[in-house]
């Protein structure tokens, strides 16, 4: 047996989201913890068997989790925040993840540049760190009982610390002295399990730009961990980017292998010489673990051959580029998809076969008939993707190539004058971010319409009634720039994707986002175009119901891109440009129909930032360019708004300014006016709508509170530059929270205007 196929980690949510279902039923008190554990064991078993059947040589244990692996690691180390001190076992575990009625949950944040969110450990010098290896060992034994000798996955100590925060705000790496002895103890315990045992230690922190001080921790840490027992073979993995600085150090420690991502970190090729010299094994991440496309195996083999020019073939193990956690489970249930498109895709289960086949092809020259057939089928899919008219659209390509309008015709100073004249809005103009509460009725009607259970007319009537109510309420409470409320949108990306050519949707393409929560991102498989107007009818209908200004609402190109699986046969920057062109047509249609303010949401602008500083400029350049392409056709009098769900603009304020939107609304309520100061500091010219109340909580803010908040804003920016709005869209809130909140917001503005004679 060749022993050269490897999977970094496997999804745990289940092919039919079984884990989600049992977790939620446990949380609702509908089943016992015992039932939850039984279901978890059944899932683990099934997932191991899938990998075994596919012939994968290196299968993991401890990649499973009831909530999150970082949380598991904190738990394993006894890093329990003080407020949870009175809880134990599963109650403690889930309280840390989700909070209780009395205790706030731990913070959650994005895992590198993926859409997975991990629990951020809260460390303190006073913690009573103590090893609890139960889960790690139990999971290993569970697999062994099925006849599988797994590698054991651990999050490495340096990544654990790098991604944690300290309650006193100080450097987390200072706690290495507390944590490392526990890792040593853990490895000692594990070495008692077998005569030979593989341990995968994830250290993805080293794909970021690290300070020399942090890099200098690698050698002493791994000299220790690597010399605990000759029975243990340590495999250090990084993913999502290159880790060249760290690789140069890891090769001089007594680890057995290094796992590198050669798809998202091509620069890792520069480290091959080091690896060769060290004689270590190389886990070569060459099958895309975070995108849904079937590999073109010929290309993958070429890449492996390129690697093999330096590192000996026998030392190369073929692997997924990262854990398969980031892709959906299986294509098996996708029975509504166009078969041709489906043939281009590969989810986790299908990727197992790709890894195995690739490993086989790489290590042997004589293929058996089955392997030969599989290779031919792969070549066929790759060929069809290169030529299919579903993907390649000449007219889109020509349009992109001859693109000439990148900027708005007039500069901001001129535009804003014209706009103020035409629109006549006051200082501290009030508006909202777009969506109003998504009721159960709305969701049902949308679903029924999709399933052909109700007629178009019935569907439209419900939507129109909702819009009527939204408009009536906004007029009643005195808001100045109105919105239609977005009742027709299930999701701010999917809604547009469904209407753009080149976009695909899955039925069962769920990916874990955090805990039990999954998302089903749409995917871009071909050249993008807009066959017909996407929002025009709804917006013009809403506008016809009021004399006030109706704001049109679109999702921006970068956000559409960042929240989708994107084709891998065209640069992201080109895909984004195509989306931008589609949106520019929409803006033109809207303005020609009399819509005078159009908001282009870029909620996910920041999410697309690269992990390495050296790559940021390039991203910013095309991301800004494409936002500008989308809005370039706007008349000077058409006011372009954008919205971003952040407030941390310190590093990117110049980039935000360069987007040249006339008005930007941002999420600032929770940070007072602190984060607004950077706008003043850099002399930001355009208008700003800093959120004056937090929409993530059901709490209704009082007039006094909002008044205070507005005054704080006025300390930073002049009244002429300020808009007043909530932090974000209101779709997740209930009407009986939204109504009093907005009424109070409008009252507060009135009060401030009177008081300060604005
Ligand atoms: N217009 C969208 C809404 O109001 C914006 C949401 C977002 O930025 N996440 O829901
Ligand atoms: Zn938002």
Image (cartoon, helix red, strand yellow):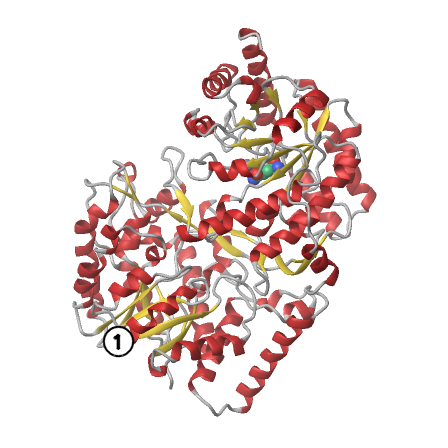
Specify the quadrant that holds the C terminus.
Answer: top right
Q: Does dot 1 land on a helix, a strand or a loop?
A: helix
Residue at image point 61% right, 74% down:
382
Give whichever of 541, 148 is nearer the camera: 541
Residue 501 shows in the view? no
Task: Give the image quadrant in which the ligand numbered 1 is located.
Answer: top right
Q: Is residue 466 left or right of residue 80?
A: right
Residue 332, above or below 667:
below
Please state if 616 lies on the left or on the right of 313 as rendered: right
Say whether residue 589 is left or right of residue 270: right
Quadrant of res 573: bottom right
**Residue at image coords 51%, 91%:** 368
Percent coordinates x, y for residue 218 in the rendering = 23, 59
Q: Quadrant of the N terminus?
A: bottom left
Q: Is mark 1 within 8 Å of ligand 1?
A: no
> Could you tell me how many numbered marks the image carries?
1
Q: Label 1: few (<14), some or many (≥20) within 10 Å?
A: few
Residue at figure coordinates x 63%, y 79% from the top left? 380
Name above or below for residue 106 compared with residue 203: above
| Image coords of residue 599 (percent x, y) | 64, 35
Which x, y percent locates residue 589? 77, 40
Query: Residue 375, position in %: x, y?
Result: 56, 82
Q: Residue 649's image quarter? A: top left
Q: Nearer the viewer, residue 573 or 500?
A: 573
Q: Which residue is mark 1?
A: 277
- Residue 296: image quadrant is bottom right
In the rendered image, the vertical position of residue 215 relative to residue 225, given as above or below = above
Which residue occupies 50% across, 90% down? 367
One can see residue 304 in this view: yes
Instruction: Pick whichever, 380 or 69, lies toward us.
Output: 380
């Amino acid at each position: 047996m060749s022993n050269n196929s490897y999977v970094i980690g496997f999804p745990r949510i289940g092919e039919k989201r079984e884990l989600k279902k049992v977790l939620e039923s446990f949380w609702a008190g509908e089943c016992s913890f015992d039932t939850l554990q039984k279901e978890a064991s059944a899932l683990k078993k099934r997932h191991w068997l899938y990998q075994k059947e596919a012939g994968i040589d290196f299968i993991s244990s401890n990649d499973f989790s009831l909530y999150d692996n970082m949380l598991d690691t904190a738990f394993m180390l006894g890093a329990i925040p003080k407020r949870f001190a009175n809880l134990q076992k599963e109650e403690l575990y889930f309280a840390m993840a989700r909070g209780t009625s009395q205790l706030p949950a731990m913070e959650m944040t994005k895992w590198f540049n993926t859409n997975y969110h991990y629990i951020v450990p809260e460390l303190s010098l006073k913690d009573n760190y103590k090893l609890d290896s139960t889960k790690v060992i139990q999971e290993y034994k569970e697999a062994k009982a099925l006849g599988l000798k797994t590698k054991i996955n651990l999050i490495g100590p340096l990544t654990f610390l790098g991604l944690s925060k300290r309650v006193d705000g100080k450097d987390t790496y200072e706690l290495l002295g507390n944590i490392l002895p526990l890792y040593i103890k853990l490895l000692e315990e594990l070495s008692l399990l077998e005569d030979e045992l593989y341990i995968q230690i994830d250290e993805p922190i080293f794909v970021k730009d690290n300070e020399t001080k942090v890099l200098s921790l690698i050698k002493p840490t791994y000299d220790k961990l690597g010399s605990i027992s000759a029975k243990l073979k340590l495999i250090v993995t990084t993913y999502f980017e290159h880790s060249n600085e760290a690789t140069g150090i890891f090769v001089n420690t007594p680890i057995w292998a290094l796992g590198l991502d050669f798809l998202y970190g091509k620069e890792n090729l520069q480290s091959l010489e080091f690896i060769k010299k060290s004689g270590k094994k190389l886990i070569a991440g060459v099958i895309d673990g975070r995108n849904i496309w079937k590999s073109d195996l010929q290309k993958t083999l070429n890449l492996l051959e390129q690697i093999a020019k330096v590192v000996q073939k026998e030392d190369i193990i073929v692997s997924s580029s990262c854990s398969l956690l980031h892709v959906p489970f299986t294509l098996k249930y996708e029975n509504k998809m166009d078969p041709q498109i489906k043939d281009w895709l590969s989810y986790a289960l299908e990727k197992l076969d790709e890894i195995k086949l690739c490993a086989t092809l790489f290590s042997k020259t004589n293929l058996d008939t089955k392997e030969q057939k599989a290779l031919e089928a792969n070549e066929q899919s790759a060929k069809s993707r290169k030529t299919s008219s579903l993907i390649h659209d000449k007219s889109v390509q020509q349009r992109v190539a001859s693109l000439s309008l990148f900027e708005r015709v007039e500069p901001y100073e001129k535009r804003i004058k014209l706009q103020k004249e035409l629109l006549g809005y006051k200082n501290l103009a009030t508006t909202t971010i777009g969506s109003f509460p998504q009721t159960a009725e709305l969701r049902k009607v949308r679903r029924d319409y999709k399933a052909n259970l109700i007629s178009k007319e019935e569907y439209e009537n419900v939507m129109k009634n909702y819009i009527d109510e939204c408009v009536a309420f906004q007029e009643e409470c005195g808001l100045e720039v109105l919105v239609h409320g977005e009742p027709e949108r299930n999701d701010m990306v999917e809604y547009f994707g469904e209407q753009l050519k080149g976009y695909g949707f899955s039925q069962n393409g769920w990916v874990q986002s955090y805990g039990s929560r999954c998302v089903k991102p749409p995917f871009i498989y071909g050249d993008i175009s807009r066959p017909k107007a996407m929002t025009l009818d709804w917006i013009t209908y809403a506008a016809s119901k009021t004399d006030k200004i109706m704001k049109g609402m679109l999702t921006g190109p970068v956000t559409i891109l960042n929240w989708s699986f994107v084709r891998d046969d065209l640069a992201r920057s080109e895909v984004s440009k195509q989306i931008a062109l589609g949106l520019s047509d929409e803006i033109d249609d809207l303005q020609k129909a009399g819509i005078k303010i159009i908001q282009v949401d870029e909620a996910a602008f920041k999410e697309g930032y690269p992990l390495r500083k050296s790559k940021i400029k390039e991203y910013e350049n095309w991301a800004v360019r494409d936002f500008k392409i989308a809005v370039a056709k706007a008349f000077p009098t058409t006011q372009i708004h954008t919205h971003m769900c952040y407030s941390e603009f310190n590093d990117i304020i110049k980039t935000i300014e360069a987007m040249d939107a006339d008005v930007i609304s941002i999420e600032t309520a929770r940070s007072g006016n602190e984060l607004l100061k950077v706008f003043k500091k850099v002399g930001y010219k355009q208008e700003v709508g800093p959120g004056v109340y937090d929409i993530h909580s059901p709490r209704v803010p009082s007039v006094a509170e909002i008044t205070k908040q507005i005054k704080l804003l006025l300390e930073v920016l002049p009244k002429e530059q300020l808009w007043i709005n909530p932090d974000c869209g209101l779709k997740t809130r209930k009407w009986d929270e939204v109504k009093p909140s907005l009424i109070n917001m409008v009252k507060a503005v009135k009060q401030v205007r009177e008081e300060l004679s604005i």
